[in-house]
């Protein structure tokens, strides 16, 4: 199972890091309710998380999914009696891609002979978020407020950041990635940097100092700034390439060279630049 203990990163704000995919789930404890940020990749994982939440607090949990990738929301069934927040686009995304995501993850799990995990995933019921938002939304936890922030397209077309200004902590979901390349497969590489940059300028985010990525180590504002800069270089080069050198994959991939990305990340960034660039 690996290490899955809560770490307090601000007063009453916890991160539970999972060996599985190095995933971070969050917990913000108010006086009346507790906010759970992301639920893991299967119902079993979600149930483990729910049990871990109960070890910290007996308050009623409220849930938010940062986005519709299975590792962040397939544990929702374990929280089906809770209010589950998500962006409208996350619910749409899950409706259209959940089974495809499941099949892709199953193929991977079977290829590495993790049959128990595969069986859990097969039996997982996908529960959509049903408190749907499409703009900034304050969630009152009693005595403190968590802010769901939406700025635009980045890692997906519906990423929510969750800021807890009284603790100086922001949960970024997969907009922010530590220890691996930003995941580009469903991304908007021409817009990602500017979406993140705008978010870093929000009062609720700017005044904080702790940043929690969807995967990897908890980091600081300098790390966030570094990733924004990296994505900014990428988008400038992609835009330049698209307008001056046409729509050739190889040329676009060259943009990601020198940024320290893996080959498959460069390819995905180039493919997504082509798919998402405005035409005409
Ligand atoms: Zn993701």
Image (tube, rainbow, N blue to C red):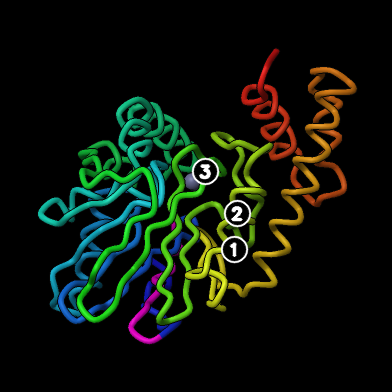
Pointer 1 and pointer 2: residues touching (CB < 8 Å)?
A: yes
Point 45% across, 57% down: residue: 161
Task: Give the magenta-colored segment's residue range.
Answer: 11-20
Residue at numbered disc 1? 200
Q: Give the spatial CA distance, label 1 vs label 3.
A: 13 Å
Which mark is on residue 152? 3
Residue at numbered disc 2? 196
In this rendering, is residue 148 above or below 120?
Answer: below
Q: Position of residue 260 (x, y in %)?
A: 80, 52
Point 27% across, 67% down: residue: 35
Quarter holding the N terminus is bottom left
- Mark 3: give few (<14), some (14-19) or many (20+) Cα within 10 Å: many
- Counting every numbered tag in the picture gives 3
Residue 19 in magenta stretch: yes
Nearest to N terminus: mark 1 or mark 3: 3
Q: Give the spatial CA distance, label 3 vs label 2.
A: 9 Å
Q: Position of residue 221 (x, y in %)?
A: 64, 72
Residue 69 shown left or right of residue 142 in the figure: right
Which mark is on residue 192? none
């Amino acid at each position: 199972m690996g290490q899955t203990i809560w770490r307090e990163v601000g007063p009453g704000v916890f991160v539970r890091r999972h060996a599985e995919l190095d995933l971070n789930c969050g917990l913000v404890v108010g006086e009346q309710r507790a906010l759970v940020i992301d639920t893991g990749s299967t119902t079993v994982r979600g149930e483990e998380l729910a049990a871990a939440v109960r070890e910290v607090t007996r308050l009623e949990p409220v849930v938010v999914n940062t986005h519709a990738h299975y590792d962040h929301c397939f544990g929702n069934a374990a929280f089906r009696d809770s209010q589950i927040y998500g962006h409208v686009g996350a619910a749409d995304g899950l409706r259209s891609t959940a089974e495809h995501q499941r099949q892709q993850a199953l193929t991977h799990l079977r290829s590495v002979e993790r049959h128990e995990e595969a069986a859990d995933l097969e039996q997982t019921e996908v529960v959509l978020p049903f408190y749907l938002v499409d703009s900034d939304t304050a969630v009152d936890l009693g005595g403190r407020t968590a802010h769901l922030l939406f700025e635009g397209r980045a890692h997906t077309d519906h990423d929510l950041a969750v800021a807890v200004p009284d603790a100086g902590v922001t949960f970024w979901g997969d907009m922010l990635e530590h220890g691996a390349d930003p995941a580009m497969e469903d991304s908007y590489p021409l817009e990602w940097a500017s979406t993140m940059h705008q978010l870093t300028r929000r009062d609720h985010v700017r005044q904080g100092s702790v940043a929690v990525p969807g995967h990897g180590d908890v980091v600081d504002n300098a790390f966030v700034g570094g990733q924004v800069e990296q994505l900014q270089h990428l988008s400038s080069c992609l835009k330049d390439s698209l307008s001056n050198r046409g729509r050739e994959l190889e040329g676009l991939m060259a943009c990601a060279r020198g940024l320290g990305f893996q080959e498959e990340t460069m390819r995905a960034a180039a493919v997504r630049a082509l798919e998402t660039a405005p035409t005409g």
